[in-house]
Image (cartoon, helix red, strand yellow):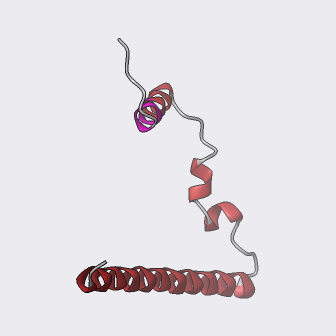
């Protein structure tokens, strides 16, 4: 590994760690805001209201969505489409 390559690797690793730190800070802030609303509310918000993305997993897939998922998995694993 040349010094230039080592320098690029070090810069990329620094950027990755900075991004990870920003994400951690955002998660801490979100958690603090959620805790605040839980402590000061007479009735805390429901789980579904706090985490609405969890509800999407419960919805059944349509036939078209299921077919698109199968096609995507087939391509991802290197399968062939036979007509």
Q: Position of residue 13 (x, y in %)?
A: 40, 81
Per the picture, the main secondary structure of the magenta-coloured stretch is: helix
Residue under the image location 58 percent in, 60 percent down: 52
- Magenta residue span: 71-76
Foreground residue among 64 and 40: 64
Tell me if residue 9 comes above or below residue 46 in the rendering: below
Q: Position of residue 24 (x, y in %)?
A: 54, 83
- Position of the N terminus, as image quadrant, is bottom left
Tell me if residue 79 comes above or below residue 10 in the rendering: above
Foreground residue among 69 and 51: 69
Horizontal placement of 80 versus 5: left or right?
A: right
Horizontal placement of 52 versus 78: left or right?
A: right
Horizontal placement of 63 versus 78: left or right?
A: right
Residue under the image location 42 percent in, 86 percent down: 18
Tell me if residue 82 comes above or below residue 7 in the rendering: above
**Magenta stretch: residue 75 in it?**
yes
- Residue found farthest to the front: 1
Tell me if residue 5 comes above or below residue 56 in the rendering: below
Q: Position of residue 64 (x, y in %)?
A: 44, 27
Foreground residue among 62 and 42: 62
Q: Position of residue 34 (x, y in %)?
A: 64, 80
Residue under the image location 61 percent in, 52 percent down: 55
Would you identify the image quadrant in which residue 46 lies? Answer: bottom right
- Residue found farthest to the left: 4
- Residue found farthest to the top: 83
Would you identify the image quadrant in which residue 8 lies? Answer: bottom left
Foreground residue among 71 and 53: 71
- Position of the C terminus, as image quadrant, is top left
């Amino acid at each position: 590994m040349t010094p230039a390559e080592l320098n690029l690797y070090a810069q990329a690793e620094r950027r990755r760690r900075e991004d990870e730190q920003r994400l951690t800070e955002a998660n801490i802030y979100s958690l603090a805001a959620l805790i605040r609303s839980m402590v000061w509310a007479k009735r805390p918000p429901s789980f579904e209201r706090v985490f609405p993305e969890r509800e999407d997993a419960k919805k059944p897939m349509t036939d078209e969505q299921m077919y698109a998922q199968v096609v995507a998995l087939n391509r991802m694993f290197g399968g062939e489409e036979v007509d």
